[in-house]
């Protein structure tokens, strides 16, 4: 990095006076001199040698254990199974309560009932009177529910704009489902980690707990219809093979001719684009299309492929001149194994009888769609038909959805950008007089934030480069540190298209033979080793690692869990032990923090704990003020040990600040971190003198301990020899160091050699013009280790933040 500055400075001098020349030997001499000076500077102000000595002194009393990946993934999976099992029990209780409530409810055509409509609550008319279906509905901000104003004592109801909120079916359903309020509250008491619980009615209303104020869009419209959500559709029907066609035969995607593709998000969106390109030409060839549809359905059934459940044909037409009875006699009767749904499009009713006959004689459903406004409501009727066998057989299958961000649900007031999955279950009518009709009442469900699920695979157990991930039985990622589902549009974060249909093979791309993916999709338990290239610092730097993958299925779910451990330091974890009294004294030092995103103590169970920081919760638990807190004893033990061993760093750094000879100019900060997530820091420079003020703040996720990763400086130091400093410039700094450059730059140099690596993205700089600012940030980082016998583990990382100053374009 310094070599680059020297060359640029000298070339600029030559441009000014045309006289000055610098020999390569002089440049090399400067580089060596600079290397020695910055190495000495880093060693002194970081205190790395002192910290290494302190950990060396305690090697006799620590243990180093090899991490057992097979045992670890099994333990994590069992804990996740237990957590998800509690959610399933809550949903089952809701389904039973809803069915019982319907059983004892007598439908009343003239029923009048004032339910709480989430669109109308706490609103008044021009005269100041509460709106009908509104009224006073207490709301209070709640930490557990994204700090939204909610009512944890009541649920309320949302009705889509296109559904009349006083319709008889809606009023009867709202009255009947009031019985769910007590179950919602009881579920939340039994499992305080529950989030939103809900009942989506087949008539269109959506009962949500806790109750909220629903905000319409800018046009005053609420387009949300629970019956269109994945959790509703998946729970309301069983798996199915569906052929959709118009009035003639043509495969809209030639690549998949006569081949079934999964109806995932990618394929559905691709299908929509292809359908948009279709144009109506002449008379439709319905008979040919009908025969082709039956052929491919029969073939897939004979081969044991597809869903192995429901099969259906959907005919979308503006009319049928015949009923095609001969086709049905040849391919579908008498078993009528394939249901046929027909949709008559337009206002013309000339051939409506034929279209209706086709559906009714093939166990399907006929719908007339005369306007665009009819589409949503009428197309959904097929769900009720396909759900009838489940209803009659009373098959209460529990479903889990793919990962999603429900930014639609609460509109602008609560756009949750957290990935989640939903568990849902159908609700059927148990009334004897309608049992044979197979009436679906709706679907109950609850959400599970995947972030909370991954807390059960804590970072400190997986090591500096290790991580956990989850996939579905389709191979799609639920959670993975390399899954980046958001992009920035202006100042707003938005989900990327198809963010929830990213395949494991797309992020673990070294698995070229897809052995890992195949085994996990099958729900197998196993291990695999791969040589991988992994990126840090937002993809600007690459490391080469040897990773061991361990995976197993999470029972009673369609999910599989995998964990990754890295060879070398990642194979071991060291364990120290001190008394609570000794550790607590050093834990309260003002220069100490712990990882705010990690779970040292569970603060989300008791509402009284939800406003506590992790450090506050740890202190209250250790001092006996909150003995009932659920804390990670192993993590607390290691944190206390690290607090004691690293305590001398505070005095060392303070002594440097108070040194009469003064501080070296440019040394801003010294800080360190340990595997337990503990951090200590010393600000050598006042805020007015610091460059890059966001570094190591709560917004600087790359340089903090998070659920997804260890800090960049920790990860990079761990791949460098212990005691040897690695120097690099934070990504933003390397990008801005030249005006006119069109690429990001990544620079690394050590005390032994100065090396420049400029990734120019295939472009040359327009004009290498030296920045006029006072200085630029350089991070100097090195690891500290513990060795017992032949085993070595990283205890922590120490680093300095240094500002390099250049005046009058001359070197230091």
Image (spheres, rainbow, N blue to C red):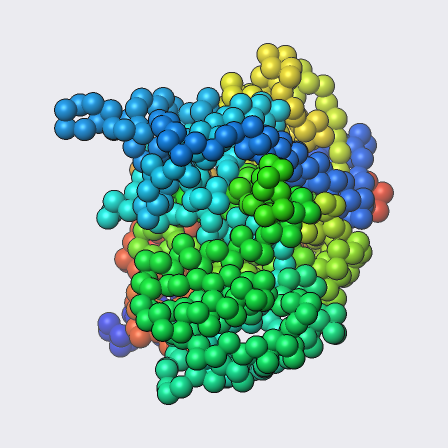
* Residue at 50% across, 30% down: 106
Residue nearest the observer in this picture, 598 or 111: 111
Q: Is residue 498 above or below residue 796?
A: below
Q: Is residue 725 above or below residue 167?
A: below
Image x and y of residue 196, in percent: 50, 35
Image x and y of residue 126, in percent: 14, 28
Determine whether, in the image, residue 389 is placed left or right of residue 266.
Answer: right
Image x and y of residue 458, in percent: 65, 40
Residue 624 is drawn in which quadrant?
Answer: top right
Q: Is residue 278 above or below residue 598?
A: below
Residue nearest the observer in this picture, 455 or 503: 503
Which image quarter is the C terminus in? bottom left
Farthest residue toward the left?
127
Residue 117 is drawn in which quadrant?
Answer: top left
* Residue at 74% across, 30% down: 576
Image x and y of residue 617, in percent: 56, 22
* Residue at 84% across, 47% down: 790
Farthest residue toward the bottom?
282
* Residue at 33% across, 48% down: 162
Residue nearest the observer in this picture, 346 or 82: 346
Determine whether, in the image, residue 130 is placed left or right of residue 430.
Answer: left
């Amino acid at each position: 990095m310094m070599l680059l500055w020297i060359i640029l400075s000298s070339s600029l001098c030559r441009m000014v006076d045309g006289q000055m020349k610098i020999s390569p030997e002089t440049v090399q001499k400067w580089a060596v001199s600079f290397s020695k000076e910055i190495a000495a500077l880093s060693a002194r102000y970081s205190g790395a040698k002192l910290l290494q000595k302190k950990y060396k002194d305690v090697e006799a009393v620590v243990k180093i254990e090899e991490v057992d990946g097979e045992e670890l993934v099994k333990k994590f999976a069992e804990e996740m199974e237990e957590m998800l099992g509690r959610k399933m029990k809550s949903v089952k209780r809701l389904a039973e309560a809803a069915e019982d409530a319907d059983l004892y409810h007598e439908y009343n055509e003239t029923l009048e009932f004032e339910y709480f409509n989430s669109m109308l609550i706490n609103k008044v008319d021009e005269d100041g009177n509460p709106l009908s279906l509104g009224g006073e509905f207490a709301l209070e901000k709640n930490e557990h529910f994204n700090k939204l104003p909610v009512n944890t004592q009541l649920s309320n109801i949302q009705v889509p704009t296109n559904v009349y909120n006083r319709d008889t079916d809606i009023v009867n359903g709202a009255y009947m489902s009031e019985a769910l309020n007590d179950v919602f509250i009881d579920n939340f008491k039994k499992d305080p980690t529950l989030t939103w619980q809900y009942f989506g009615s087949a008539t269109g209303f959506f009962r949500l707990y806790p109750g909220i104020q629903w905000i319409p869009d800018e046009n005053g419209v609420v387009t949300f219809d629970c019956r269109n959500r994945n959790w509703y559709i998946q729970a309301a029907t069983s798996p199915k093979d569906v052929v959709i066609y118009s009035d003639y035969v043509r495969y809209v995607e030639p690549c998949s001719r006569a081949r079934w593709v999964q109806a995932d998000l990618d394929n559905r969106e691709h299908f929509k684009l292809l359908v948009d390109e279709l144009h109506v030409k002449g008379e439709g060839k319905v008979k040919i299309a009908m025969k082709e549809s039956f052929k491919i359905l029969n073939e897939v059934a004979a081969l044991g492929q597809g869903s192995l459940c429901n099969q259906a044909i959907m005919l979308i037409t503006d009319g049928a001149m015949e009923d095609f009875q001969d086709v049905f006699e040849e391919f579908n009767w008498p078993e009528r194994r394939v249901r046929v749904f027909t949709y008559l499009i337009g206002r013309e009713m000339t051939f409506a009888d034929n279209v209706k006959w086709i559906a009714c004689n093939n166990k399907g459903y006929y719908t007339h769609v005369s306007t665009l406004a009819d589409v949503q409501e009428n197309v959904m009727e097929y769900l009720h038909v396909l759900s009838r066998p489940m209803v009659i057989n009373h098959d209460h299958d529990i479903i889990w959805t793919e990962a999603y961000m429900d930014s639609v649900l609460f509109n602008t007031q609560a756009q949750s950008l957290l990935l989640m999955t939903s568990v849902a279950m159908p609700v059927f009518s148990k009334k004897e007089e309608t049992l044979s009709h197979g009436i679906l009442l709706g679907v109950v469900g609850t959400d599970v934030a995947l972030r909370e699920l991954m807390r059960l695979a804590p970072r400190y157990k997986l090591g500096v480069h290790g991580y956990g991930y989850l996939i579905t039985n389709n191979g799609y990622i639920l959670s993975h540190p390399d899954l980046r589902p958001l992009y920035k549009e202006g100042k707003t974060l938005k989900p990327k298209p198809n963010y929830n249909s990213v395949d494991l093979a797309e992020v673990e791309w070294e698995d070229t033979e897809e052995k890992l993916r195949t085994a996990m999709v099958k729900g197998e338990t196993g291990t695999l080793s791969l040589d991988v290239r992994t990126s840090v610092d937002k993809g600007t730097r690459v490391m080469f690692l040897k990773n061991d993958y361990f995976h197993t299925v999470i029972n009673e779910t369609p999910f599989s869990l995998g964990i990754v451990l890295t060879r070398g330091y990642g194979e071991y974890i060291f364990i120290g032990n001190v008394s609570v009294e000794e550790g607590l004294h050093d834990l309260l030092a003002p220069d100490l923090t712990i990882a705010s995103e990690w779970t040292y103590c569970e603060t989300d169970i008791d509402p009284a704990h939800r406003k506590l920081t992790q450090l506050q919760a740890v202190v209250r638990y250790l001092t006996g003020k909150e003995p009932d807190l659920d804390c990670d004893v192993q993590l607390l033990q290691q944190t206390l040990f690290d607090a004691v061993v690293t305590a001398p760093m505070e005095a060392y750094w303070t002594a440097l600040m108070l040194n009469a000879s003064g501080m070296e100019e440019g040394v801003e900060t010294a800080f360190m971190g340990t595997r337990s997530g503990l951090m200590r820091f010393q600000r050598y420079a006042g805020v007015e003198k610091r460059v890059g003020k966001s570094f190591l703040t709560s917004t600087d996720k790359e340089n903090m301990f998070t659920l997804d990763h260890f800090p960049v400086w920790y990860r990079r130091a761990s791949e460098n020899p212990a005691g040897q400093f690695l120097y690099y410039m934070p990504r933003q700094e390397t990008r801005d160091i030249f005006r006119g450059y069109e690429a990001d730059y990544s620079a690394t140099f050590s005390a032994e050699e100065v090396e420049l690596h400029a990734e120019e993205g295939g472009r040359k700089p327009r004009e290498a013009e030296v920045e006029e600012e006072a200085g630029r940030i350089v991070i100097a980082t090195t690891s500290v280790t513990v060795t017992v016998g032949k085993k070595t583990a990283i205890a922590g990382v120490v680093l300095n933040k240094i500002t390099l100053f250049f005046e009058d374009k001359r070197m230091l």
